[in-house]
Structure formats: structure tokens, C-alpha cells
Image (cartoon, helix red, strand yellow):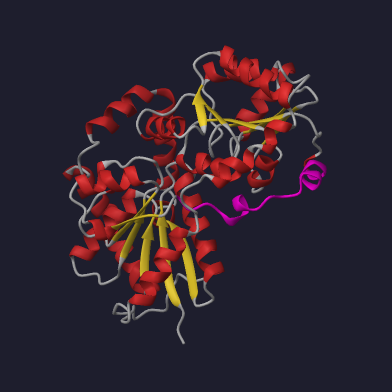
Amino acid sequence: MRKKRILLLSEGFGKGHTQAAHALSVELRQNSSEIITRVIELGAFLHPTLAPWVFSAYRRTVTSQPKLYGMLYRNQYKKSLNRVAGLALHRIFYAQTKAVIRQLRPDIIVCTHPFPSIIVSRLKRAGLPVPLFTVITDYDVHGTWIDPSVDKYLVSTPSVRDHLLRRGVPETHVEVTGIPVHPNFRQEHSKEQTLSEFGLKDMPTVMVMGGGWGVFKKEEKEELLTYIASWSEHIQLLICLGTNEKARQQLLEEEVFRRPNVHLIGFTREISKLMDISDLLITKPGGMTCTEAMAKGIPMLFYSPIPGQEEKNCQYFQEQGYGQMITSLDMIEHWFKLLLEQYPELSKRRSDVRTHQQFRAQDCSKAIIQYLKLSDKRPYIKSSTTTPLIQWY
């Protein structure tokens, strides 16, 4: 019997969207042996030369001109993608995306970024018979996510569902599932093994994250990071810089970041383990990072949210009591002193956060599998006459 094929499409604007796609892919395959999946970052896959330039320009804009980005975000907040941008996506991606889908012949397409969702929606209006699920990977919903051709939205919270309903999305097309996180973030790893693996000490530990790109603005490095590093005699610091090796080397040039209890960590697939041995997370409020931290039950402090979706995420997590926005260095001092006074009892409270989560991450995969079970007919897509260049795994 032919296995059900699930194509997951993302984009490389930040790391969270693709992390969600991979997390969902793993969850789907773990929940059913009758499923195969494929994750594709559409822009990088179709245009490997152009995509890095686009992503770099986006990164420079949100870090160096956040007010401009915020203005653009708010201006389009209640609108679908404008006509010019839609036409650009059509010209650049439409025909090639259609060819990819024709080669892979998926039973369902799941998008974790609005751009591939827009493209597939347009293909559906032109006759593509494949169901389209869209996973909204933040705690708010921008207008670009919304399209009548989406068969089902999988969303983080009831408030996001209500927002979609107010925008005219039928109630049957929305399901509250939480944001998918990799199963590793629902496991509790051995503290002793992790400390040994990374050469760390059993002492109060704070993790600092600059997002998947490891970006810290100049003022954040000079004020926030330098101040945090000044506590290293009493607190172990894990400063995660992602793929930004340049930033890691720049920090290593300063004596304060070369102290024994300061660890500058580059790209790693072991963030779930490092979160398990950390007592506090200082981070930008990206939807994926915060969801992973929530799954671990680790308290959070937020800095420099990108105007728009990260501000909304920050608002949600503060309202739910999972974290606080850093308003001054005094707040960091307060938390660090609290950590020192109450260690290790403070870390034992993390189970309370896990217990009170409303939605389990695996609900996303269950919703997709249930939809496939209820659908008796597979979509008919005329196959390519050439040998497929893209393979399932």
C-alpha cells in the first residue's frame, strides 16, 4: 500500500518556521508508520543563489531598522499580501512550485510560513486538488497568513483562532493545536550526562539566545551581554550564537567573555539538553524559541522584540506568566539574585509550567493524520513525464 505523502513547505526568514516544519515532520512519522514526509524551504530550494541575498537583506532590515520593519508590519496587519508582492511571488515561484508538487504528488501540503501558503493557495484556485494546512507559528496572526483556499489552520491559542474567525475564516477551518516542537523538547535529559558532554558545572545556569542567526545588536552586546557576563563568577552563562560564527569570534576578543563560566556556543542541535540544565532563559521572543522553552518549563526574560510578531509573542507570554520583558538591568540583577538565593529549589518548580500548558505540541500531527484518515480519495495530480528529481525520505 502506498504511504501517505505529506509535503511541508517553509521559508528561511528566521529559523523558527523551518524548525516547526521539521518538528512536525518527526512527529508525523513517529505517530504513523504509514506516512512519509518531505520538508522544503521553498525559496532556498528553488532559487539557491537568490535566497541567501534576500534573507540577508531581511536580517539587516529587522536588526538595523526595526522601526521601519514594524511600520510595514502594522501597515499590512489587517491586509492580505498586496498585489505587487503577490505578483512577484507568482512570477518567481508559481510555475516551479507547481512542478515540484507534480513530481512529489503529496496527499496533503502543510505550510509553516505565509509565503508558501500564499503560493499553494493560488495553485489551488487554479485547480490543484491537494488539501492545504497552514500552521501559524506565532501567538498572533498577520493578514498575510489568511487566504480562503486554506483548508485548515492549526493555531497556537484560542485568541489566534478568534482573530481568524473575526476575519471571516469559517470555524470548521481552524483548530487550536499549539505550535509543534521537536519531541526532544518534551523529554527530560540527564543533567549529569549533559553537564559532562558540554564540560559544564553543576551551578546556577543562565542561557542567552540571539535567535537562530545569533544576532545581537551593538548596544545589546555592549550593555546586555557585558552586564550578564559580569556575573560569571557566580552564574554559569551559556550564550548561544547559532550560525553566527563572526559574532562568536568578536565576543572572544573581549576578556569578559573568556572567563571560565562563560560559554559561547555556536550552532548546535542540542538546545533541548542545554535548556534542561538552564535555570533561566534570556531571549528575543521568537514564537518557536519561546514555545520550546515553555515545553521545558524554563522561565524567560525577553529583550529587544522585533516590532510586530515578536511584540505580540512577548505580550502573550507575559500575560500567561511565562516570562517578563527586560525594562532595565535592575530586573536582570533581581532575577540573578533570586536564582542564587533559591538554587536549586527554583528549578524544581519547572514541572508546574509543563503541567499547566493547555495544548500539547503533538496535537498538530494528530489533526493532520485524522484529516487524512477521513479523506477516502487521494488527490489526482498528473505525474511528470520525466523522472522525478526530488525524492521522499
Q: In the image shown, does 135 or 176 lie closer to the viewer?
A: 176
Q: Is residue 181 above or below residue 321?
A: below
Residue 268 shows in the view: no
Tell me the residue at 21%/38% (across/down).
Answer: 78
From the viewer's perspective, is 254 left or right of 100?
A: right
Q: In the picture, residue 281 is in which quadrant?
A: top right
Farthest bottom residue in view: 1
The answer to which image quadrant residue 77 occupies is top left
The stretch drawn in magenta includes residue 48: no
Q: Nearer the viewer, residue 349 or 266?
A: 349
Q: x, y (%) of residue 197? A: 80, 45
Residue at coordinates 57% horizontally, 41% vertically from top-left?
A: 353
The image shows residue 161, relative to residue 246, as above or below, that is below
Tell me where residue 285 appears, x and y as whole percent. Answer: 47, 33
Q: Nearer the viewer, residue 365 or 92?
A: 365
Q: Is residue 194 magenta?
A: yes
For the point 24% across and 63% down, the residue is: 123
Q: Is residue 295 left or right of residue 118?
A: right
Q: Position of residue 382 (x, y in %)?
A: 29, 79
Asked if residue 143 shows in the view, the reply is yes
Left or right of residue 330, residue 58 in this image = left
26 shown above or below 253: below
Image position of 240 (left or right of 54):
right
Q: Which residues are magenta?
A: 179-197
